[in-house]
Amino acid sequence: MAEIKAATPEWMLAARQTGSCIPTGERLKPGAIERTVRGLSRALRETVFAEKVASRDGLLQGVDPRAKLVGLLGLLIVAALVRHWYVLLGLYALTLAAARLSRISPWFFVKRVWLFIPIFAGIIVLPSLFNVVRPGDPLWTIWDFGREVTFGPWSLGESLAVTRQGLDGAVLLVMRVAVSVSLAMLLTLTTRWADLLKALRVFLVPRIFILILSMTYRYIFLLLGLASDMFVARTSRMVGPATPGEDRRFAAGSMGTLLGKSHTLSDEIYAAMISRGYNGEPMSMHRFQMRAHDWSWLAAAFVIGLVAMGGDRFLG
Amino acid sequence: MHIPDGYISPQTAGGLWAMMVPAWYWAGHKVKSTLSTRQAPLVAIGAAFIFVIMMFNIPVPGGTTAHAVGGTLVAVVIGPWAAVIAVTVALVIQALFFGDGGILAIGANCFNMALALPLSGYYSYRLLSAGSRPASTRQWIAAGAGGYVGVNVAALLTAIEIGVQPGLFHSADGAALYSPYQLSESIPAMMIAHLSLIGFVEASVTALAVLYLQRTNAGILNNFGAAGRSVSAYGPAATAGNVTGFKLRPLITGVVLLLVFAPLGLLAAGTAWGEWSPAEVGAKLGFIPEGMRRLSGIWSGIMPDYALPGQGETGFWGAVPGYLISGIVGLGLVGAIAYGAAKLLSRRAERTG
Amino acid sequence: MDDSRRHMGAPYEEAFKKDAAGIKAPVNNAPEVEGRKNMVIFEARGVGYRYDDDEALSNVSLNVHAGERLALLGANGSGKSTLLKMLDGLIFPTEGSIHAFGEELSEAALRDDGFSRAFRQRVGFVFQNSDTQLFSPSVREEIAFGPLHLGISLEAADERVEDTIHILGLQHLSDRPPYHLSGGEKKKVALASVLAVGPDVLLFDEPTAGLDPKTETFLARLIVQLAAAGKTIITATQDLRLVAEIAERVIILGEDHKLAGEGTPSEILGNRELLLAANLIHDHPHRHNGIEHFHPHSHLKDHHRDEE
């Protein structure tokens, strides 16, 4: 040990560190790095969760991925075409039922849809409710100016009011987003990703594209792991918060590192592929088979779509 | 910038899908001929990389964060057409598995971010860096400028696709069926944020990453960068023409900048932003600048209410002008940049070769 | 682990013999290996490799015989991985030549579909980093990748996958995606994906790097059993303990990227000067019974896990 002692500077061997371990009550604000790490680990957790749901024994899990993809895509188009919010409400109720039958917790399903996506959609749509942004028939006058108010070249009109057209459009948009997101969630939560990607063959997506998609999905996890290691390593070395400038340089540096590692990785993967006989023509194991209940699912989706479109036309 | 389902009509979405199919076909053809059997792992890892860096939060002035798209950076490293496929793959996975962007809107999102962004970004980079050595300062500055151009072209196309909706699709009494905001509102909402902030985030990330690679891993920049040198240990890698010395450069730079900024300037002029703007920006881009939020409480700008030609026609065919407009503008922008770059580069190659 | 050990032993060797015999190359570019114990399968003559301006390997000549257990021993950066990749036809010598099964291994030769298939079926490569080798969506598909791409029917591939899963005791993992596996499980799946092709020659690059002791023991036993089943085994490693277990001939690559020595494991491991010169052992302070002293010490695997 004598040699090590002689070669090691005094400060490294000193036991005492400056500062006490007593909390000072100052909170470190979560910076960009922490948020990135949290985002990365959330993405990982969510996919693990999705795989779990996909392996449950439920209604949609039992449907052939190709039939499921075609059916849900058809309903997605119907949801995009209808013009009445109550038709969308009906479709939404059906997605809830499908979620329940596919053993997805309804609370989770509703929360996931309504807590995040349409609230953003709702905020975006809010200004369009008012006559100052979109002219229309006033439904509820908030503030009557009594005369036309102008700011330089811009006119505010004579009153501030919520319009019927604005409200209709806003409800329609929010409902449409909710139904679309619910349908997409039903698809991805009840299908293993590998099966979903292979089901894309029904739309004549080339095999090479499906191979690339599945490899991308697989290596996202490796790169997410590498990225969060870099961020965690940095956080653990940091004393006090970093300035935004430091964070930016670090983000760019880690992207560069990641890109370099990605490039090496793709070289190695390529070698591993050709070593096992890959010659540019991808092959894969297909084991899909359309059975009676797959056809009945398709028929059900078709009828639901037809009823929704017909009802929508009937309502004018 | 990811358009969710519900914001654009299925007709617009379908039209953009139809435009993307030949683009994907062409990209696949180009990639196969340049990368041959290497394409699968290289493009897949490029796509995984794009996916991951879209999750990196980057601090912007105002105390919040934004994220980069990375399409230009990937185009610089693996080539523009391989980048088209790589960004497409990343977007498809985001839409299918992470609910980021709609499924019907994949065509539209790919048109903006997987086609227009990497192509305009890459060819801007090639133009600005033509003649410089791989290790030169101009390389990373050009990459940054390419990132800025690419992201703004994509944002403009997004704004146009969203902005044509209310004029084309509304009910008999004028209620919007999809996005309620018009071009005069959507363009400034997107472009002010992108021209002033997001574009610079993309630019600085692209530039710094290229600078970092120049110092640590120069080999991988040579693939499609200024010098054509094989970088892969396994089999042949694609080579790009060796480009050196370039006299028209300053002129071209000016023209490209004018091309990109002039129409944006015209579109943004005479408009102001209202309370919807930060929310739009916030939801679509993941951040709301503090200052913008405060300002928006005070301000309540009014848009001149002008209608698009074709307003009132709401049938299926009423949609045609919607995607035609964004298509023409997008292809025009990308085409002008790409054509100019290709023309100049090939003329140069003839002269030296 | 215990699960998989149950499947080792006699039935396991049987399975591999059956498997090896079951493979028929579609064309006869390469001669049959079965039954020709002394046949030279790899012949390297003055092989060198340069990448950009760095030299990775210089003037290496060696023969590998069918059924042989060979270890390539060398420190990090000595070029043993490079040599292994050249033997698998993944990279090609910039100087000298390598012949495999009597045919020169070159880019042109491997572009020939017949030769390429026959060669890839005969030679399997287990990479150091299992992640690069596990690129498929599930364990089952990973194992099927090799057989399917070498032109075996879906049904036959299915049977091979089942056999391989059974032999290595991977039943509980078969539908899992590869990123949810532990390091040891990944290594087993990578090995399964290579064994499913049914190669006569197996190349291992640092097989025990980063593995837990249990998997390490499993792997060493497996290599011995594969050799007993008639496979040719070439292992690149710097783990001296492993060499004694799995090799009958050892080749040392020096830090100058040249051959530094050759011999049986006992000859090589007993040659302290040679091992010191090749940077495979170093003097290391030690404490026995409270007395501090130096004696030579090998680089144990975890010392230098990340080669790249």
Image (tube, coloured by chain):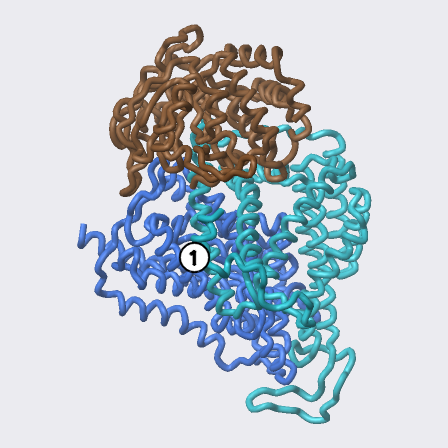
Residue B323 in picture, x, y percent from top left: 53, 60
User: The disc labelled 1 sits on which kind of residue?
Assistant: Thr
In this rendering, does residue B167 appear at all? no
Secondary structure state at the residue bearing disc 1:
helix
Q: Nearer the viewer, residue A261 or A299?
A: A261
Q: Residue at image x 32%, y 50%?
A: B222
Side of C216 where C85 appears, left or right: left
Q: Nearer the viewer, residue A130 or B1?
A: B1
Quarter location, residue B280: bottom right
A13 up-or-down from C192: above or below: below
Which residue sits furthest top?
C35
Q: Nearer the viewer, residue A260 or C275?
A: C275
Q: Residues within 10 Å of mark 1 (few under 14, many from 20)?
A: many
- Residue at numbered disc 1: B72
Question: Which chain contains the residue that carries disc 1?
Answer: B
Residue A297 in picture, x, y percent from top left: 75, 38
Side of B174 where C116 appears, left or right: left
The chain letter corresponding to brown is C
Residue C304 in picture, x, y percent from top left: 46, 39
The number of callouts visible is 1
Side of A173 where A281 appears, left or right: left
In this rendering, does residue B122 appear at all? yes
Side of C39 where A12 appears, left or right: right
Q: Residue at image x 59%, y 55%?
A: B105
B263 up-or-down from B230: above or below: below
Q: Nearer the viewer, residue A230 or B313?
A: A230
Q: Residue at image x 25%, y 54%?
A: B243
Chain B's colour is blue
